[in-house]
Image: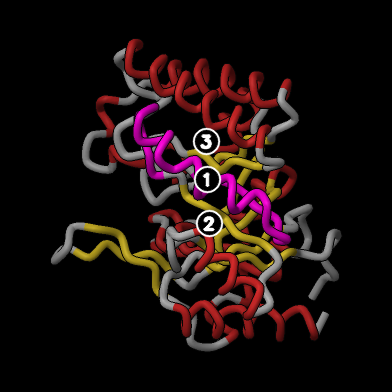
């Protein structure tokens, strides 16, 4: 196993709690040095209600990164007015990041459009993601594109093309990699998927695999039980510049168990 190029920060997610005080206390009491906070608001009015929470996180002693799992807003929307609206809102999030000392924001292409990919347009994706990335660079904020289990970012070669065309970096979600059709059907291994994007990876989301629960019509993250559930992908991460290992789970005991697995992997490098 390789020694990480940069010692990783093991972080927890606002899946645990959306209340800043609760989240900070959990991180500080359980050995997490980072928190990835999901901005759920998709309107200026709702975002204003989240600001107190965001400011409180920014004043904590742990590193904060933002995650923007928007369901309606979409940079790649074929309707230019909707793509522009999404880019404008992302710029507001970048301004908030700058104001609160946050350097990284994870974004997506097509997250809320799992069953409506035909409404997306690749040219718009590149145009408006590039626009957002350029704006972020001026604010010293880094935009990282996350891979999904569908759409363009479900294929590492296509995702790499988009990343290089837009100037963004990558947040690699190893649970999405594990569930990607290209890995499930053995076209390539999870390690090969990660390796293709390795030069661009600055952050990661770590858990075993994402499954789509048809009973609730929602994706669900499954925690690793043993080290072998995630060790191959994590080992590949350790050859990259990725220094952010986010345990993207909400159940506190699962989060702590996964952190212990990651600590064990690190202790054997």
Q: Compared with residue 114, is residue 63 higher up or lower down, i.e. above or below?
A: below
Q: Is residue 257 or residue 15 the one in the foreground?
A: 15
Q: Which of the two labelled residues, at mark 3 and mark 2, occupies the earlier sequence position?
A: 3
**Mark 1, mark 3: which one is toward the viewer?**
1
Residue to which mark 2 is pinned: 173
Indicate the quadrant where residue 231 lies: bottom right
Structural crowding at the residue carrying mark 1, measured as other residues with C-alpha within 10 Å and reported as few (<14), some (14–19) or many (≥20)? many
Residue to which mark 1 is pinned: 146
Residue 29 percent coordinates (x, y): 63, 79
Task: Point out the stretch of residues depicted in magenta.
Answer: 40-67
Q: CA distance from mark 3 to mark 2?
A: 16 Å
Residue 111 percent coordinates (x, y): 36, 41
One can see residue 189 in this view = no
Q: Are marks 2 and 1 in contact (CB under 8 Å)?
A: yes
Q: Compared with residue 66, is residue 225 higher up or lower down, i.e. above or below?
A: below
- Tell me which residue sits at (39%, 27%) in the image: 44
């Amino acid at each position: 196993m390789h020694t990480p190029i940069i010692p990783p920060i093991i972080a927890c997610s606002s899946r645990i709690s959306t209340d800043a005080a609760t989240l900070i206390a959990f991180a500080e009491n359980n050995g997490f040095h980072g928190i990835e906070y999901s901005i759920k608001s998709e309107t200026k009015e709702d975002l204003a209600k989240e600001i107190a929470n965001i400011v409180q996180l920014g004043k904590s002693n742990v590193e904060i990164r933002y995650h923007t799992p928007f369901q309606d807003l979409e940079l790649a929307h074929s309707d230019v007015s909707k793509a522009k609206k999404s880019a404008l809102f992302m710029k507001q999030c970048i301004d908030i990041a700058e104001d609160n000392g946050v350097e990284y924001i994870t974004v997506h292409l097509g997250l809320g459009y799992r069953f409506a990919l035909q409404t997306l347009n690749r040219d718009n994706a590149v145009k408006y993601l590039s626009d957002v990335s350029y704006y972020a660079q001026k604010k010293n904020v880094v935009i990282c594109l996350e891979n999904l289990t569908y759409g363009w970012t479900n294929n590492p070669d296509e995702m790499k093309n988009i990343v290089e065309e837009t100037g963004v970096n990558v947040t690699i979600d190893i649970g999405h990699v594990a569930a990607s059709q290209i890995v499930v059907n053995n076209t390539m291994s999870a390690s090969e998927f990660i390796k293709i994007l390795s030069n661009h990876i600055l952050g990661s989301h770590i858990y075993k695999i994402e499954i789509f629960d048809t009973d609730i019509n929602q994706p669900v993250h499954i925690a690793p039980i043993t080290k072998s559930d995630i060790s191959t992908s994590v080992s590949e991460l350790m050859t990259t510049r990725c220094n952010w290992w986010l345990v993207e789970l909400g159940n506190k005991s699962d989060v702590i168990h996964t952190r212990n697995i990651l600590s064990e992997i690190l202790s054997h490098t």
